[in-house]
């Protein structure tokens, strides 16, 4: 997105095209490449909590804000556009509240349940 599309249009213009369904005839559908490039702007890989995403956004905005010394208005537009893509993904994400998902998110609970009755571990 930033490398591929910023050559012909700004990142924020591209985001508006995604949001309003005007990008390459895809409708308002987000592709994984869009999300990857937005995560690249934030330097995020793998898993991140919503709190970590918001904190990274605040850090980047403080660093590149035009009112700050050496700020960059275009970079702020890229950061905010990337944040909107990530938040759109989070907003549309279907959370799983199954036991398996809970235990995947909380491995210490999986271990506690697995070994709670084991006499070696105090059970």
Image (tube, rainbow, N blue to C red):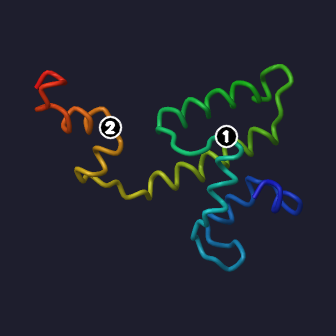
Q: Quadrant where the C terminus lies?
A: top left
Identified at 61% across, 32% down, the residue is: 56
* In this view, 68 is above or below 94: above
User: In the drawing, does residue 90 fall left or right of residue 80?
Assistant: left
Q: Quadrant where the N terminus lies?
A: bottom right
User: In the drawing, does residue 11 fall left or right of residue 112?
Assistant: right
| Label 1 environment density (alpha carbons within 10 Å; few <14, some 14–19, many ≥20) | some
Relative depth, front residue between 6 and 94: 94
- The part of the image, by quadrant, that contains residue 71 is top right
* In this view, 66 is above or below 87: above
Across and down, in percent, residue 52 comes to 52, 33
Residue 105, disc: none
State how far apart marks 1 and 2 are (Cα): 25 Å
Tag 1 residue: 42
Identified at 22% across, 50% down, the residue is: 99
Mark toward the start of the polypeptide (1 vs 2): 1
- The local secondary structure at tag 2 comes to loop
Across and down, in percent, residue 68 comes to 78, 21
* In this view, 63 is above or below 21: above
- The part of the image, by quadrant, that contains residue 34 is bottom right
| Label 2 environment density (alpha carbons within 10 Å; few <14, some 14–19, many ≥20) | few
- Name the front one of labels 1 and 2: 2
User: In the drawing, does residue 109 fall left or right of residue 8?
Assistant: left
Identified at 80% across, 29% down, the residue is: 66
Tag 2 residue: 106
Identified at 61% across, 29% down, the residue is: 58
Relative depth, front residue between 95 and 65: 95
- The local secondary structure at tag 1 comes to helix
């Amino acid at each position: 997105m930033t490398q591929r599309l910023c050559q012909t249009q700004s990142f924020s213009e591209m985001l508006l095209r995604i949001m309003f369904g005007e990008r390459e005839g895809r409708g308002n559908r987000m592709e994984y490449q869009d999300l990857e490039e937005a995560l690249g702007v934030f330097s995020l890989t793998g898993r991140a909590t919503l709190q970590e995403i918001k904190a990274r956004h605040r850090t980047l905005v403080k660093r590149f804000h035009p009112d700050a010394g050496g700020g960059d208005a275009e970079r702020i537009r890229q950061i905010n556009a990337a944040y909107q893509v990530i938040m759109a993904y989070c907003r549309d994400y279907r959370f799983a509240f199954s036991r398996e998902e809970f235990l995947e998110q909380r491995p210490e609970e999986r271990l506690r349940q697995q070994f709670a009755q084991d006499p070696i571990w105090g059970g």
